[in-house]
């Protein structure tokens, strides 16, 4: 049996992936739906990027998320054993330009793969690179808005498979997803909403999780749009909030100052993204936040929120509280922006510590503190902005009560 190596690339925008339909003139599986794919000439990594550029013209819009070990697919009729190298990319654009080998495309929720006539084992290839509880737990590069979408995808995909098989344990999976990132209110609330509104059938969980995915994408975008109304022309931010980045890209202020956000330095990545979008960006060391606000005529401080407590306290990446204090001292407006789903009941939140060796990996007998999150009291902020606009303290408390009710789904559910 002839063995051929191929790549299959899944391009993800929000919580949808790109499916393309092969033309009748292609040499294998004409008329079938698949990912962006082709022979793995050179290295699989090189082939994946070449195919994205050649087949759909989206190479400049993608960022690789992960790849997986090749999946063997035996086609006895063709006498071929395919070795499928799966890749997952996040894609900023949905503007697809098909080449002559493809005749159609759609952005779909991945469970649609199970309902289509596809190339062999397309779902297996997707599942190999799809989010998992482990990837949700291990993600230290993204904010909670992004990570909560990935958590919803895990629940959605598990329900899709269960709907095909007629089984599934969603209760334990939902609890595992909540426990994976307990400090991130959006993860907890969005998983709770699915479990509180769905019935115990796999079809119902799939429908609720899919709706939650779409709702989450929309609410994050609407929160970013609402934040644009408070931005001045010289904005300071820190860490990497997808909602903040979206607001800044759309508002195009005169200048943006980004704290590097040690030790992971995700602020540097945020600065790169904003500069690539054409903004005038300056990166600075975290300890200089007060000096930058004072000397660079900053008029707005804007950062994200991993969690908002019922009393209006914002829990976010360390450095947020010093930025808020410096803004208050200088008379500069300071806001946090996030979706309503980040508001949680209670006035305390779990705060995940970072790895000690990210701060100190020497041999001396010293203690290490590497807190990842800190609390910014409500009185230090000019407001918390959500998709509903700025919220008052009573508004925040009311939303927290709504989310407390969602958390009461039965422990035996699923």
Image (cartoon, rainbow, N blue to C red):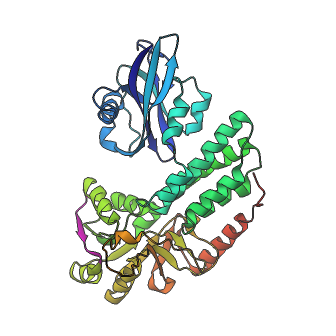
Residue displayed at 57% across by 61% down:
180
Q: Percent position (x, y) of residue 100?
A: 35, 19
Kindly tell me whether residue 231 is visible in this rendering. Answer: no
Q: Percent position (x, y) of residue 70?
A: 44, 32
Residue displayed at 34% across by 27% down:
40
Give the quarter of the image for residue 254: bottom left
Residue 315: in magenta span: no
Kindly tell me whether residue 36 is visible in this rendering. Answer: yes
Residue displayed at 76% across by 44% down:
201
Residue displayed at 51% across by 36% down:
126
Name the quadrant of the N terminus: top left
- Please indicate whether residue 119 sits to the left or right of residue 90 in the image: right
Give the quarter of the image for residue 310: bottom right
Give the quarter of the image for residue 392: bottom right
- Please indicate whether residue 306 sits to the left or right of residue 111 in the image: left
* Relative height, residue 343 to residue 32 (above, below): below
For the residue pair 267 and 226, the one nearer the viewer reads as 267
For the residue pair 390 and 352, the one nearer the viewer reads as 352
Magenta region = 279-286
Q: Percent position (x, y) of residue 124?
A: 54, 33
């Amino acid at each position: 049996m002839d063995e051929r190596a191929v790549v299959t690339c899944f391009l993800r925008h929000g919580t949808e992936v790109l499916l393309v339909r092969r033309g009748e003139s292609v040499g294998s599986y004409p008329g079938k739906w698949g990912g962006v794919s082709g022979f793995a000439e050179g290295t699989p990594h090189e082939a994946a990027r070449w195919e994205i550029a050649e087949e759909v013209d989206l190479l400049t819009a993608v960022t690789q998320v992960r790849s997986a070990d090749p999946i063997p697919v035996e086609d006895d009729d063709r006498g071929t054993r395919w070795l499928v190298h799966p890749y997952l990319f996040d894609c900023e654009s949905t503007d697809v330009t098909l080449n002559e080998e493809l005749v159609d495309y759609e952005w779909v929720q991945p469970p649609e793969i199970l309902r289509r006539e596809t190339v062999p084992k397309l779902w297996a290839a997707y599942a190999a690179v799809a989010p998992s509880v482990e990837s949700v737990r291990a993600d230290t590069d993204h904010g909670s808005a992004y990570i909560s979408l990935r958590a919803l995808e895990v629940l959605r995909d598990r329900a899709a498979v269960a709907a095909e098989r007629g089984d599934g344990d969603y209760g334990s999976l939902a609890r595992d997803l909540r426990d994976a990132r307990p400090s991130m209110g959006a993860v907890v609330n969005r998983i709770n909403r699915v479990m509180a509104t769905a019935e115990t059938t796999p079809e119902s969980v799939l429908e609720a999780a899919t709706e939650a995915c779409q709702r989450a994408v929309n609410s994050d975008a609407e929160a970013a749009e609402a934040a644009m109304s408070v931005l001045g022309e010289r904005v300071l931010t820190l860490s990497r909030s997808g909602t903040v980045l979206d607001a800044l890209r759309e508002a195009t202020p005169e200048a943006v100052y980004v704290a590097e956000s040690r030790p992971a330095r995700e602020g540097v990545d945020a600065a790169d993204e904003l500069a690539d979008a054409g903004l005038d960006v300056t990166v600075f060391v975290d300890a200089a936040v007060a000096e930058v606000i004072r000397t660079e005529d900053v008029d707005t401080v804007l950062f994200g929120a991993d969690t908002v407590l019922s009393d209006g306290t914002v829990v976010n990446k360390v450095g947020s509280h010093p930025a808020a204090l410096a803004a208050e001292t200088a008379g500069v407006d300071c806001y946090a922006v996030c979706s309503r789903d980040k508001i949680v009941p209670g006035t305390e939140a779990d705060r995940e510590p970072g790895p000690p060796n990210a701060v100190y990996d020497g041999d001396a007998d010293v203690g290490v503190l590497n807190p990842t999150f800190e609390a910014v009291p409500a009185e230090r902020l000019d407001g918390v902005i959500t998709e509903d606009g700025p919220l008052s303290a009573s508004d925040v408390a009311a939303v927290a009560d709504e989310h407390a009710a969602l958390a009461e789904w039965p422990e035996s559910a699923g």
